[in-house]
Amino acid sequence: MPAIRQHLRFILNGEDVSLSDVAPDATLLDFLRIKRSLKGTKEGCAEGDCGACTVLVGRLGRDGLVYESVNACIRFVGSLDATHVVTVEHLRGANGALHPVQQAMVDCHGSQCGFCTPGFVMSLYALWMRHARPSLAAIEEALQGNLCRCTGYEAIIRAAQAIASYGEAGNDPLVVERAAITERLRVWRDGARIDCGGRLIVPASVDDLAAIFAENPKATLVAGSTDVGLWVTKYMRPIEPAVFIGALDEMKRVETHDGVLRIGAGVTYSDARKILGEKIPELGKLIARIGGEQVRNMGTLGGNIANGSPIGDMPPPLIALDARVLLRKGSERRELPLEDFFLAYGKQDRQPGEFVEAIHVPLPAPGTRLAVHKVTKRRDEDITATLGAFAFRLDTENRVAAIRIACGGMAGTPKRALGVEQALLGQRWCEDAVLAAMERYADDFTPLSDMRASAEYRMLAARNLLMRVYLESVSGKAPVTIARDVAA
Amino acid sequence: MLRNERNFGSPRDRVDGRAKVTGAAQYAAEFNAPDLLHGYVVSSTIAKGRITSIDTQKALDVPGVLKVFTHDNRPATAWFSSSYQDEVAPPGTPFRPLYDEQIYYSGQPIALVVAESFDVARYAASLVEATYEAGAHETDLKLARAAAYVPPKKRQGMKPPASKGDAMAAYAKAPLRIANDYSIANEHHNPMEPHASTVIFEAGGKLTIHDKIQGVMNTQSYVSGVFGLPASDIHVVSPFVGGGFGSGLRPQYQLFLAVMAALDLKRSVRVEMTRDQMFTFTHRPETINTVLLGADKTGRLSALRHQAVAVTSRFEDYQEVVVNWSGILYDAENKQFDYRIAKVDTYTPGDMRAPGAPLGTFAIESAMDELAYAGNIDPLELRLRNYSTRDETTNKEFTSKELRACFQLGAEKFGWSRRSPAPRSMREGRELIGWGMASGCWEAQFSKTSAKAVLTSDGRLEVGTATADIGTGTYTILTQIGADALGLDMEQVTAKLADTTLPKSPVEGGSWTAASAGTAVQMACEALKKTLLQEAQKIEGSPLADAKYEDVVFANGRIAMADDAGRSLDLSDVVRHSGQSEIEEQATAQPDSKVQAQYAAYTHSAVFVEVRVDEQLGLVRIPRIVNAVAAGRIINPKTARSQVTGGTVWGIGMALHEESLTDHNLGRFMNHNLAEYHVPANADIYDIDVIFVPEEDDKVSPIGVKGLGEIGIVATPAAIANAIFHATGKRIRELPITIDKVLREAA
Ligand SMILES: Cc1cc2nc3c(=O)[nH]c(=O)nc-3n(C[C@H](O)[C@H](O)[C@H](O)COP(=O)(O)OP(=O)(O)OC[C@H]3O[C@@H](n4cnc5c(N)ncnc54)[C@H](O)[C@@H]3O)c2cc1C
Ligand code: FES
Ligand code: FES
């Protein structure tokens, strides 16, 4: 058994914080606003939707100390061990002046009522530290998770473009103090298990997690807390005892073995996007449509699968790619096709005490075409109305040699379109065959109507997506990626 | 004397910018007090009926809970419901929180748990158990409209214009005819800051209240009326408001609950709403318009009938101007207007950005677009053919109307002349392209407002009035006006707002604040200058001893002879010599009743929109909008542009996203969060070009200003819907135009 530490510690702006009496469901936002009276960080929704609560969390990762924007409202204090939390109060420029990000926001008129402003400032701060001169696309992505009800955004975008002219990152406190902070955090990562009164546990390693969870299968696993956070803030569900698994390095690994990408369950969307995006660009593009930057910096692939949601975005493309999920209980591991993991609405093939350790994604065979389309009511920061993921290969005679189609939002689970696949398999890849196959969606799915879309819409749009994939595959300029050498 | 306009009309940064980007600006829930208590609201789960019992014991057993207030044990408040009437209450019986066991709507507050900490209050609130006897509720306007009625008692200015001629007969004979229903969903304001009140219980029972309110005087008089305290015991201070858009015009229930608890427990109390509770008071009312147009072959209107029916609550007759806009924009020989409301089991709807205007404008401007296609006339040309030159609805001249210039400049900027008229005739890649336009107007109002101007002995000017700055830029424009008046730099001027100790003003709303508060500050400064000159002349050997007011100028912190700068005095010296620590003057700006009797004042806009529609999936993008606005003189192009851009984005929200979906079985709004109630995100916004058309107007207000808070949204939804028709050939008459409507609606 690893050593046990009964407190967690992190840096808050310039100050060391050590906490032993901390509730598992205490959010960072309440900690800042109520316990520390740091009211620059706002609460607009307490659900991760608005970004008013954006702060930075610096953590030691693969590339050293990285600062990421997160939603303090759904981030638990329990997940902060050995991190550096930075709030708007920490920003400053040279000689008492405003920080370049802040000055640009003032000069470009980036606020009206100002309530969203500190959140925008923090999102832009995180961006500016990564890119001194970000592209418009990078700016828009960094701001996906911030809502402003007043300004209409335009001025904020202009501010983002202007920041570089106000100062370089070199003088920024976080850059100046980088080495010292890194050192402090490294020392704090002492390999101990954290246990605060048995209510809040941070395992020392994956093996430690396996042991803890097998022994205490009723515990709530908390990875990125982009779901669990809402259980607390929205439904006041007790999560005690909570086991925080988001910082386990071993669960954050990505490796390629024998043409199979092994992605640790704790890999965040943001990390996955960088790595997966290179190997399977369509997945990278999809991830850019999940939540906002803050949610992507927290939410994990493992959580997106383990929560069993019918509208989770990663399962359909992973099913289309024939991914497998690696489950672990104690020292036992088993692997099963991801599509078999989802049994029914709210029910997965997962035993008490068992957790998702990794996802294994076979790299698409050469010549495989992959297309993923997520359809939402609002373009960004919206949950899927319907999602279609298509992986297929044509033979030399233009016949469909292999095809897997999986959909989100069309059933109680992410689900394959077996009938549609069958209608196409072996057929010539042509409009008539596609039109005929479109009819088969009705055999495969009986979607529901809800706030996001009507059943009728979902059915029509799902079918139209197949046609779109076909048209794009023949017109050439479309976002249907053809995997050539990725397996190499 | 010449008016100094060094700042007036020039782009200036917000004076409160620094406070906002650093997080230092304090909002209602952010004021602290020693031993502050926290209240958490428990909401009703049924839409109609009564509470048969409410069990608070489990909550009371939680350590740290002081009291659970319900209708059973609430302290006595005012006897008459009229005492609950606030400054902007519509006719009816205002909602009285925790008054009795009756439930009027889903989400109604039924208990307040007060505890030493927020977490404890929230947790204990989850333990309060109510049982109900549910009644049959109705929340569906389509059903309730059968019992719609003409509101017997009108809110001020809410009278539809008189009919003229015989609209139906003219319609029957008209060669071109349009008759359709146009509806708009319920919407919620959703300012980013949730409503909150912090009530500080001072020694002696006086209260200092930090309330999320668009007018502190309204909070003061409400609390005074309901709780029977003298106004002098109620000090309301709300320097920053995190957006309002109308939701903060009336004091909301969190204020009542916080004051009630503070007075009862003799402690300071804060009550904050959660985002889902933001859906439990006031909203823009679902409205169905019916418009009927008859025109000759050239498109000249002979018949215009505009009817509307909107929801209101069981207890108040909320009303807004919906149908009048048609009659202001267009004249027809034969006209008929009708506005009704229908009772449903929700909270009372309320004013939301440009209340009523985008709803009626969506209807008339969609119908005009349909008429344009029916007559094969360019939509812009059709509007010019029916351009009204006086306000027939009130039978008055316009103080000014540069809508024609809006059309011209907007169309030029947009490239309207290159439009191919037929629907579905423009396409790029998989997207259909549509160009649409619409026009709109909003009443330029002026409300009685007082202000003060104070010069201190260090030569600084402070201007102040009780109105709010809900983000619009009031602090900034008043600073500009004060600086110009006294010839100071803006850095030497401070604007004070949102404090009941300041001179009286109405709530900030209706786009009247810039004109009214701006004029009041200007007048107070003029009065101050006169006093300063008098004081200057009292100084022994004063170089200005024989100067007339007309002959001096205020510049660079000095009073000087206009024709002899050498004869001057420093303002701070004048104050010092007066023997006072500061010199203060106040003034009250009032609308000119003679002008009002003769003229009608409106802000106008013409909006041009390009949409791109992905027809297979029903997705709509809006790559560009040109919004050309005539709003009199613009005090600060920077804040002004921001207002109109923001308003235009609200129009995008109304057109494509915003909708409070009701589960009629439960009688409840379903999407009560920002994940499912979609306000536009950055990705929904592309190019928005705002043009201010020059408009001189010496009648609308002494400073020639009309106000800008509302006009941005007014014509935008209609222009978008018209562009979607042009792109797809699908006429969608129900807002918002969501993906399934675009996919479903037959071309
Ligand atoms: C604002 C916002 C926007 C969002 N947008 C999207 C979106 O566009 N698309 C989308 O798909 N999702 C979206 N989500 C949902 C969410 O981001 C995902 O479901 C996320 O992947 C969950 O991962 P997590 O690490 O945050 O999980 P957590 O919240 O920590 O956990 C989720 C569930 O999984 C369990 N769990 C976590 N890890 C494991 C594991 N390794 N083994 C077993 N069980 C585990 C937890 O116990 C819990 O039951 C959004 C969420 C928010 C707040
Ligand atoms: S408060 Fe809205 S995202 Fe956190
Ligand atoms: S400035 Fe008000 S929400 Fe952004």
Image (spheres, helix red, strand yellow):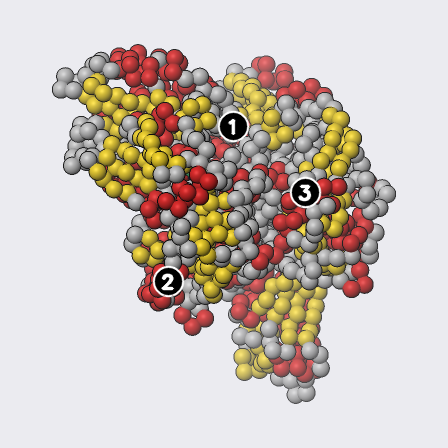
In the image: residue B592, left or right of residue B704: right
Q: Can residue B159 be seen in this view?
A: no
Q: Which chain carries label 2?
A: A
Type of amino acid at the residue the image marks with label 3: Ala
Q: Quadrant of residue B269?
A: bottom right
Q: Mark 3 lies on which chain?
A: B
The secondary element bearing badge 2 is classed as helix
Question: Label 2, on which residue?
Answer: A187
Q: How far apart are marks 3 and 1 (CA)?
A: 28 Å
- Specify few, some or many for label 1: CA neighbours under 10 Å numbering under 14, 14-19, or 20 or more: some
- Specify few, some or many for label 3: CA neighbours under 10 Å numbering under 14, 14-19, or 20 or more: many
Q: Nearer the viewer, residue A101 or A126?
A: A126
Question: Label 3, on which residue?
Answer: B125
Q: Where is residue B157 in the image (x, y as percent from the top left)?
A: 70, 39
Q: Which residue is drawn at 62% across and 37% down?
A: B279
Q: Do the residues labelled 3 and 1 touch (CB within 8 Å)?
A: no
